[in-house]
Amino acid sequence: MVDFRRVILALAVLTLLAGFASAQVNTGVPQLTCATQVAVTPLLRGEGYTEMTGDITISCTGGTQGPVGSSIPLVNIAVFYNTIVTSRLIGATTNAFLPNEALLLLDEPGSGLAGDGPARGQKLCPTPITGCAATVGSLPSIAGGNIVAAIGADGTYAPNVYQGTSSSTTGNVVTFFGVPVLAPTTTGARVFRITNVRVNANSLSGAAGSAGAGSQVTATVTVSGAASLGIPPGVINVGLVNNGLAASTGSAGSINQCAAQTKSSASTISFTENFGTAFKTRVSALSTGLYAGQAGNPTQNLPGGIYNSESNFVFPIGSQFSGLADYGTRLKATFSNVPSGARIFVSTNNVNNNASPISTPFGGGPVGGSGGNVNPATGVPYVGFAQLVNGETSPDGNISGFLPIITSTDTATSGNVPIAEVSISNNTGSAVWEVVNTDPNTVETLKFAVYVTSSANTLPAGSPPTVTLSFAPTATSAVASSTLSIPRFTGAATTGTGTGSIFTVNICRTILLYPYVTNQAGFDTGVTVANTTTDPFKTVAQAGSCKLNWYGGTTAAPTVPPVQGDTGNIATGTVWANTLQAIAPNFQGYMIAVCNFQFAHGFAFISDVGARNLAMGYLAVVLNDPGDTSARSPVNTTTSENGGH
């Protein structure tokens, strides 16, 4: 649905800027001729709320410079996006405008390109709401001699980095106020680079559909002020939205309710990126050093640099950093419906399978270093590396400071996979891994192992525990914020999460039917139950009682059966025996025994008292258990009438 309030406000801003431009354009300052482009249009994850758009560059030529000492015309540059801008808010706010991490760079400072502008250091304008005034002056040129340059209030070269602002009413606009435009005249071009603009890509993901189809993030640039930049009308494509994640769960493990489990393999969960840059490290690892891709103080400040990380152009603003993400891509498994008797463990890094870990990043080298982000072997599929962290919003620290990595506390029962326990509260818990090594040129699948520990006869059958997979951290807010983490994602199942069972519990019981038992008319019935879980086949030894359910009546009450009986505990390898006269006197009918262990077998023997004249015996019918969907009951899972003797 169109938000007409935002449309009206956007039109009002455009009208205001256009009026300002109209009032100022006839000042005798000739119009500059400009061209806009986006050198790289990145793929944005449709699950993301803070996806980094491509840089917009505006290259202008022509114009006339004023005399030395004259004021340089200032312009306001506004960029309208077709979705909400979510760049981090940095700095003091006003009622109308919120400074954010978006930046405008003049003449590619610090890029190392040819020319005086690129050779200058990066200097921030400290007043983003008003901009920074400048005058025409002269500065030494890197090529020798002097050049006409913009001079700031301190008498040195004017600021060349301008901080963007968001409107408190129109969330899809970034405005750069008070940017001086010194006409390049006949020599070279004046270049404006707009970078570090994050947007809510999730609002456009509905048009993306499958991973193979996408929708575009577009931008429109408008200029107002004392100088006129001749920017051609039209929209600019700054991003292509695709769902970034295809997640899945492996086959659910089958657990015997009777048997204790000790870090037993339950399931394997998989996260597959839909394109090579869906998984990113926090910053681009510029060295082979330990956790170079997670450092908090990276050298990642070349205008136009392609970093393929969650961070972009990193620039300090006060005590904060524009463009710096809080961590790399994180992957979350949310466990639900975990029975109170179960403990869940996960691998602390990704695995080949549940018995074999990936112990170090591909190609070796320190974890998080650049050596693990390339494939040194021809024909060998690259696999990234991710590590368990202590929460979805715990920030990465500096290289010498805090990193929220969880180290293993144990290994799985089978193989040598390092594991750690998942904290479960109210039958729910989550595990989060951060990608610390990844190759942007490879579509990767990261697998993690899940294990379970439980005591015998504690896990209920049916209603198995499930896991839901997603990017992390998940959030509900898609607006710009000074406190919410970057990156952040939706956890909705429509945007690439997978859900499935992690294990099933096979019910641990045997149902025995004694079709006729009597203690009337001078007859009695002997009843036995054998616990045969001790056998030559290495069956798990089990023990439990049998509940005796009577159907029929007594001589005194032919339609009223006795109350339910109980054999008491029957140890493995033993036989319980009793007579009807002792446990259900004067009863006649049939009896169903529900035994809380597998492989129970029954025998009944009917005779006249003393067994002098008539006697017969039979084996109890072993009924299929309607609550057991394992291979032990393959014939019928809806009734119990396929049993055998």
Image (cartoon, rainbow, N blue to C red):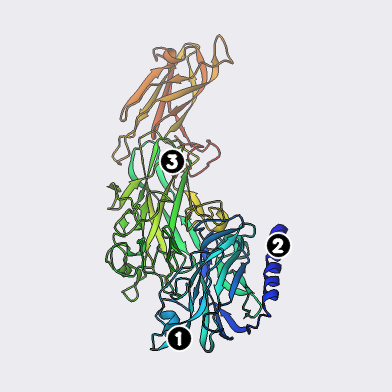
**Dot label at residue 105:** none
- For marks 3 and 1, give the one nearer the viewer: 1
Residue 339 % position (x, y): 44, 37
Query: As shown in the figure, which amino acid type bears the numbered disc 3?
Result: Val
- For marks 1 and 2, give the one nearer the viewer: 1
For label 3, the SS is strand
Question: Does the image show residue 496?
Answer: yes
Residue at screen point 40% across, 26% down: 603
Furthest residue toward top? 556
Which sits in the foreground, 523 or 236? Answer: 236
Query: As shown in the figure, which amino acid type bears the numbered disc 1?
Result: Ile
For the residues labelled 3 and 1, say whether their Cβ atoms are less than 8 Å apart: no
The CA distance from mark 2 to mark 3 is 55 Å
**Dot label at residue 147:** 1
Residue at screen point 56% across, 65% down: 130
User: In the rendered view, would you say 518 is above or below 622?
Assistant: above
Q: Which residue is mark 3?
A: 505
Which sits in the foreground, 248 or 230? Answer: 230
Residue 264 % position (x, y): 34, 45
User: In the rendered view, would you say 499 is above or below 171?
Assistant: above
Q: Which residue is mark 2?
A: 7
Residue 313 % position (x, y): 44, 69
In terms of sequence position, does the residue under pointer 1 or pointer 2 come before the other? Answer: 2
Say which quadrant the C terminus sits in. top left
Question: Does the image show residue 614?
Answer: no
- For marks 2 and 3, give the one nearer the viewer: 2
Which sits in the foreground, 226 or 239? Answer: 226
Residue 229 picture quarter? bottom right
The CA distance from mark 1 to mark 2 is 45 Å
For label 1, the SS is strand
